[in-house]
Amino acid sequence: MSLFIRLSLAIAAILAFLSSANADESAPGKHSIAVFAGRATWTNYIQTIYSPWTMEMADIGVVGGAYSYRFGSVNELTGWSLPAAIGDHLYVEGELGVSTRFGDEDMQEGWAAAYLRYDYLPWNDYVYTTIGVNTGLSYLTEISEFERSRDSKDDAAKLLHYMGPEITFADPDNKNLELLVRYHHRSGVFGLFDGVVSGSTFITAGVRMRF
């Protein structure tokens, strides 16, 4: 059994136990802790989204954790009166996270990000699902030679843009325990950060507990 599968099963079991006392079918908690693990891919970020079955994986793994806080819905925070299906179900969250890479690279990462999360989906009475997109900053403790090798200009930097879009799944009767799939991605945004045009993408999965 792979390290990734063992970690995922252990984390899921621990958080399932901890969240059992916090089950709440009305609304998930504002605070959350997430843990995840995954593997890097050589494949271009856009290609991993529209044709994930073509991905070529690298021998670099990641294990990470993050704390996030839900500030409220767009309608709550702005005082707007957008239709409830949008304004009451599009949430603003902040996240702080850390991770470590292993395998062909050994270094640590920290990031800060702002998320927009949407949860008004037609099947949510059966599987409570959310979709989150974000923007933020990521800092590595060392220059990544993996990221340099993927850059068309052979550039790399410790500080890059962070993007971690994700989808989550939960029992509608216990929205506080989520399974998540996240694209853990950092890049130079076409040269905006120190001329870096590429970066790295990790395909990850994990669990989140809200409280």
Image: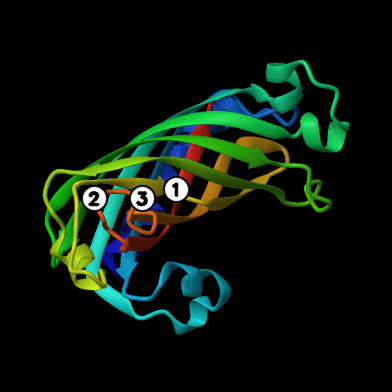
Which one is in front, 51 or 27? Answer: 51
Element type where label 2 sits in the image: loop
Check if mark 1's residue and mark 3's residue have beta carbons within 8 Å: yes
Residue depicted at x 67% and y 45%: 171
Q: Is residue 89 left or right of residue 63?
A: right
Residue 10 - label: 3
Pointer 1 or 2: first along the chain: 1
Q: Is residue 140 above or below residue 148?
A: above
For label 3, the SS is helix
Quarter of the figure with the C terminus = top right
Pair 2/3: label in front: 2
Label 1: which secondary element: helix
Viewer-proximal residue among 106 and 7:
106
**Amino acid, disc 1:** Ala
How far, Cα to Cα, is label 1 from label 2?
A: 39 Å
- Mark 1, residue position: 12
**In the image: residue 25, left or right of residue 37:** right
Rendered image: mark on residue 194: 2
| Quarter in which the N terminus is drawn | bottom left
